[in-house]
């Protein structure tokens, strides 16, 4: 049995670049870039286009086993026009393209901002609580989760939603962020693990917070441990 | 203290027409029609335009105390393009227009199809369960609920989401629908009551199933009774 082929959308993004490096030994990668193609490494396939363009994303997903959907506007300050196009239209086209092309599984980059108002209220949060988004960006990601559930129930797609915490390009920036990151940190290697566990797990649909094993966490990752087998190796406490 | 002024969007729709009649003695009504203006009655204000057109909806909400947002594509078979424009863009523009114009409250016509897959699985459903939409239409209404919660938490709007059950133009059609309607029926007068209770209740945000006091109900309306004071007068059993 050959290796799985996995498409990463948003491959030029901060997380996309880390996943490209972290998943290349495990999977054959196809990378989708929106505008700028980074240097192509041996063994990689590359496609160019917007996930909000149905023809482009259909071509991109054709023949892969799973899609790691990282494309979208990642800013909590994103405008309505931007999240409508890049996040809402983008995730619809991605799921729909997977349905049309028979792709089995999507790992959807959701966000902790889907439930950001619990955090503001100091509420310990499990993935089962009703959504309380703190931004139009958060609302657009809640939409991606709900649409994913629909594609699972109605069309048999498999969708793993990861509510990613604080993903930093370098631990050197952590000091600037205050104490929040001690609760919300997702290390690079834990992020890579969480994504491949999501690809491999025998789960049809799930929503999981994506953080390391932080001592001060206020988002529950028990279901990620139990259902996905996620075993984070890092704890933000060592940064304190 | 004068009477409240209430805007009904989607006034030409099946529910809109019933609300127009049922709310006119309680409120001063402004009716928003998309394309076709029905005969104008004395005391009514009328505006024409799409809720997905920001300028049109801003003008429509200006000066009202509450908006009863019934506009949108009501079909469970609606296409993505249609729900994206009429339901997703439409509800965004409605909330945003209310924020800009200082309108206090929105009654949002959601749907039982936000949780339609629980029904298919035979699960008794409360409003707190995670969304399981059964259609792109249902996903678009889940979006309207989530966006509403965001506008409540972030901008102080008040949003009452009503997951309307089976609203029939005439009880004569009921025989054709099989037994489902014995569980899911919302009579005209109960619909009218639920909406004005939603306008008057001291609640900042809530999600409620909109059905009559049906003996065979599988959607929970306890919170509508307790939080809104909703006291339905009908039971579909008398139709059996």
Image: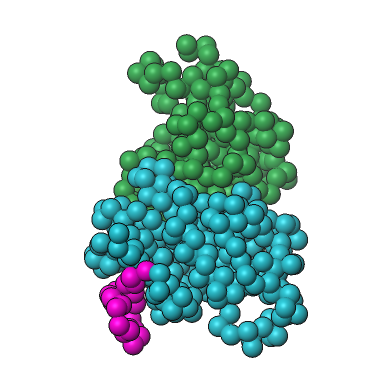
Chain colours: A cyan, B green
| Left or right: A58, with A193 as reference point | left
In the image, B229 versus B118, the foreground residue is B118
| Left or right: A121, with B98 as reference point | right
In the image, B121 versus B10, the foreground residue is B121
The residue under the point 44% across, 22% down is B180
Task: Inspect the magenta stretch and tell me whether residue A32 lies in it.
Answer: yes
> Picture quarter containing residue B150?
bottom right
In the image, A110 versus B19, the foreground residue is A110
| Left or right: B16, with A232 as reference point | left
Residue A195 in sight here: yes
Q: Is residue B11 above or below residue B18?
A: below
Q: Percent position (x, y) of residue B162?
A: 56, 39
The residue under the point 58% across, 79% down is A168
Which stretch appears magenta?
A27-52
In the image, A205 versus B119, the foreground residue is A205
**How many marks overall?**
0
Q: Percent position (x, y) of residue B158?
A: 64, 51
> Picture quarter containing residue B22?
top right
Task: Inspect the magenta stretch and tell me whether residue A40 lies in it.
Answer: yes
Q: Percent position (x, y) of residue A151?
A: 39, 48
The residue under the point 54% across, 31% down is B123
The residue under the point 45% across, 31% down is B120
């Amino acid at each position: 049995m050959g290796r799985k082929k996995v498409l990463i959308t948003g491959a030029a993004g901060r997380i996309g670049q880390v996943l490209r490096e972290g998943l290349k030994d495990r999977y054959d990668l196809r990378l989708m870039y929106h505008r700028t193609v980074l240097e192509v490494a041996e063994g990689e396939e590359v496609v160019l286009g917007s996930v909000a363009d149905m023809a482009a994303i259909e071509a991109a997903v054709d023949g892969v086993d799973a899609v790691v959907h990282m494309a979208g506007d990642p800013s909590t300050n994103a405008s309505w026009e931007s999240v409508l196009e890049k996040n809402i239209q983008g995730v619809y086209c991605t799921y729909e393209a997977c349905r049309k092309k028979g792709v089995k599984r999507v790992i959807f980059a959701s966000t902790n901002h889907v439930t950001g108002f619990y955090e503001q209220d100091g509420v310990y949060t499990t993935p089962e609580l009703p959504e309380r988004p703190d931004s139009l960006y958060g609302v657009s990601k809640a939409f991606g989760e709900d649409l994913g559930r629909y594609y699972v129930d109605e069309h048999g797609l498999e969708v793993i939603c990861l509510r990613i915490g604080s993903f930093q390009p370098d631990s050197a920036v952590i000091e600037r962020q205050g104490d929040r990151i001690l609760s919300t940190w997702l290390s690079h290697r834990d992020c890579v693990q969480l994504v491949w566990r999501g690809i491999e797990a025998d789960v049809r649909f799930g929503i999981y917070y994506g953080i390391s094993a932080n001592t001060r966490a206020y988002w529950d990752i028990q279901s990620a441990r139990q259902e996905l087998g996620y075993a984070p190796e890092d704890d933000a406490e060592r940064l304190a």
